[in-house]
Image (cartoon, helix red, strand yellow):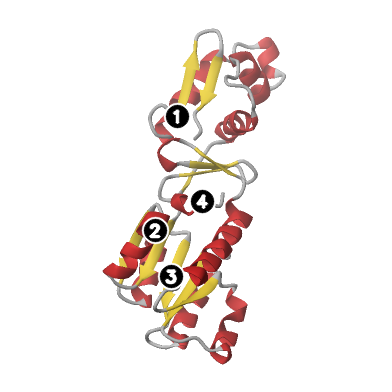
Amino acid sequence: MGHLSLHNLILVGNKEDQAYFQSLFQSIHLVENNEEALQKYEENEATVVFLSCHDGMNNAVKTAQKIREHDRKTSIVFIAQKLSSAKLIKALSLHLSGCIQKPFKEKELDKVFENIRKDLALFYGHRINLVNNYQFDKEALVLYSDKNKEIKLTKNEIKFMKIMSHSNEPYISTEVLEHTIWEEESAHADCNPRLKHLIYVLRKKLPKRSILNAYQQGYKLVTG
């Protein structure tokens, strides 16, 4: 999933900086300094963070270190007026997606954005897009809201989402769903009421019209 329009950015900068990146991301949280960026990150779990070196490289490094204590997935970029190799050595262990020097240069930005896409793809490449920017990770079997928050699923809800997300068929029949979820039990028990209840509860965790059903065809998970 390399499209930045599916990701949220926390940006330490000004309105001009925000306008520059506005079209690339799903949303941008503009903050004044790295401390506010860290606080906003802890609240929103954005997938991309642009930190400022305006108050010195050490300040940006310390903020990035706090993010990296528990998170290797988030893409981190430093923005600076001047960049020096000696100072950047301090940030090597932080696995940055890049550094951007102001004033912005298109060629430099293209390179950094390509790095961001590659870095995000390592962790988010198994996600499929659902309705209203919800996502499901087909490998980790985790459902995410439009705010990139994990939504808890039951064991059978996970089975249902796994079947639907891996299928190439437009609809999955109730018989296939019942047999896959309840296995041998479905051979000698009517599991249809249980399936309907499972889908009823799961629909409450998803945006409207995420799961469709068609007469004599079964159910469909809407992706896009």
Disc marking residue 44: 2
Q: Amino acid at mark 4?
A: His
| Residue 107 on image: x %, y % | 51, 69
Question: In this picture, is 40 found above or below 134?
Answer: below
**Which one is closest to the eye, mark 3 or mark 1?**
3
Q: Earlier in the sequence, mark 2 or mark 3?
A: 2
Which label number is shown at residue 185? none
Q: Position of residue 141 (x, y in %)?
A: 60, 42
Name the kind of residue labelled 1 in the image.
Ser
Residue, x 45% and y 81% (percent of image)? Answer: 60
Label 3: state its secondary structure.
Answer: strand
Q: Earlier in the sequence, mark 2 or mark 4?
A: 4
In the rendered structure, find residue 50 and report the number of the disc placed on it. Answer: 3
Horizontal and vertical percent for residue 221?
Answer: 52, 28
Residue 197 vs residue 14, the one in the foreground: 14
Q: Point out the tag, 3 or 1, that comes first from the N-terminus.
A: 3
Bin the neighbour count of mark 3 within 10 Å (Cα to Cα): few under 14, some 14-19, many 20 and up. Answer: many
At label 2, which amino acid type do we have?
Asn
CB of mark 2 within 8 Å of CB of mark 4? no
Residue hosting label 4: 3
Question: In this view of the protein, which residue sits in the foreground, 218 or 1?
Answer: 1
Mark 2 to mark 4: distance in Å?
19 Å
Q: Distance from label 3 to label 1 (Cα)? A: 33 Å
Q: Which residue is mark 1?
A: 210
User: Which residue is pictured at 43% across the width and 84% down the height?
Assistant: 59
